[in-house]
């Protein structure tokens, strides 16, 4: 059975005071039919994981380095995230690809290390506005996934997130047909490469301006197994609406 996952990416937002949002989420979802993940900035991973304890919410990092340790000022190793209490890590978010010039090969190396270290890698892909308009969306997604997903990917250690860059933080959302087209395409790629057993069971998240108001219709689209949520994950009141929509999807 494919896992449903509601994942929140706090990006460069949040201080210790923001952990009150976690308390509110725990109160609203003492148990859940789906997995819930929060990826706070690295400074909060340890405190958030400790706050949640054995609760139903997982804690994740937003990035990790491909090397296990070494002279990489400012970077974080996968093992450090595990040590801090994380179970997941996002790799290849478009903001990392853009701001830090991360290539598919970089992302594959990070995902390989992350999964070998015991983390679930949430591997992101997505086309730009120009690529969508030029009709290149499926080519772009195919290339990104071929280059970014490591050969050791399994349904237990890998999640794919489709996030059209033009939909992130903009309030613009693809049509349900557009989301379905890309998710069906990703499913086919996963099955072709890893076989039905693995390919059919890797969860595929949609991300980009998911809100409580549009979550239900997005979760009804084929091969949408959850969401990667930015802005609407910062406040428990918003994120809980998305989690509830996924629970009933
Ligand atoms: P958004 O961000 O929900 O604020 O659009 C999504 C993401 O970047 O993961």
Image (cartoon, helix red, strand yellow):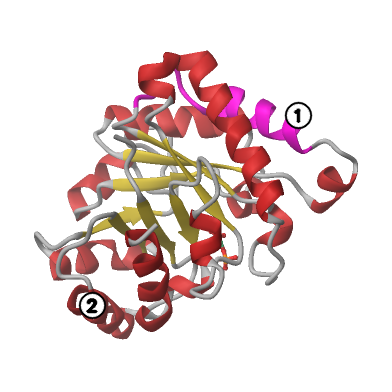
The part of the chain drawn in magenta is: 137-154
- Front-most of 84 and 74? 84
Dot 2 surroundings within 10 Å: few (below 14), some, or many (20 or more)?
A: some
Residue receiving disc 1: 139
The residues tagged by marks 1 and 2 sit, at their Cα atoms, a distance apart of 41 Å
- Front-most of 230 and 179? 179
Residue receiving disc 2: 28
Mark carried by residue 97: none
Q: Residue at x 45, y 16 (%)?
A: 194
Quarter occupied by the C terminus? bottom left
Q: Is residue 54 magenta?
A: no
Magenta region, mostly helix, strand or loop?
helix
Question: Left or right of 201: which side holds 13?
Answer: right
Whether the residue under disc 2 has CB within 8 Å of ligand 1: no
Residue 152 visible in this rendered orientation of the protein: no
Q: Residue at x 54, y 75 (%)?
A: 213
Image location (x, y in percent) of residue 74: 44, 54
Q: Is residue 239 above or below residue 247?
A: below
Q: First in sequence: mark 1 or mark 2?
A: 2
- Front-most of 52 and 14? 52
Q: Residue at x 24, y 34 (%)?
A: 118
């Amino acid at each position: 059975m494919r896992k449903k996952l509601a994942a929140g990416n706090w990006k460069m937002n949040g201080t210790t005071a923001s952990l009150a949002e976690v308390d509110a989420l725990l109160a609203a979802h003492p148990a859940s039919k789906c997995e819930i993940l929060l990826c706070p900035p690295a400074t909060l991973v340890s405190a958030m994981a400790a706050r949640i304890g054995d609760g139903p919410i997982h804690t994740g990092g937003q990035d990790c380095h491909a090397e296990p340790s070494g002279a990489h000022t400012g970077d974080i190793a996968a093992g450090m995230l595990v040590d801090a209490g994380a179970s997941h890590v996002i790799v290849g978010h478009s903001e990392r690809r853009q701001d830090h010039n991360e290539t598919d090969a970089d992302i594959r190396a990070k995902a390989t290390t992350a999964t070998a270290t015991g983390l679930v890698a949430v591997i992101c892909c997505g086309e730009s506005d120009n690529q969508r308009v030029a009709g290149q969306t499926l080519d772009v997604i195919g290339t990104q996934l071929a280059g970014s997903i490591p050969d050791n990917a399994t349904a237990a250690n890998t999640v794919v997130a489709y996030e059209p860059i033009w939909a992130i933080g903009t309030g613009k959302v693809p049509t349900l047909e557009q989301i379905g087209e890309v998710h069906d395409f990703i499913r086919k790629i996963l099955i072709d490469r890893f076989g039905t057993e693995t390919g059919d069971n890797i969860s595929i998240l949609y991300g980009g301006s998911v809100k409580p108001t549009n979550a239900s219709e997005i979760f009804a689209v084929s091969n949408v197994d959850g969401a990667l949520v930015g802005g609407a994950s910062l406040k428990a009141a918003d994120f809980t609406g998305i989690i509830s929509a996924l629970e009933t999807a």
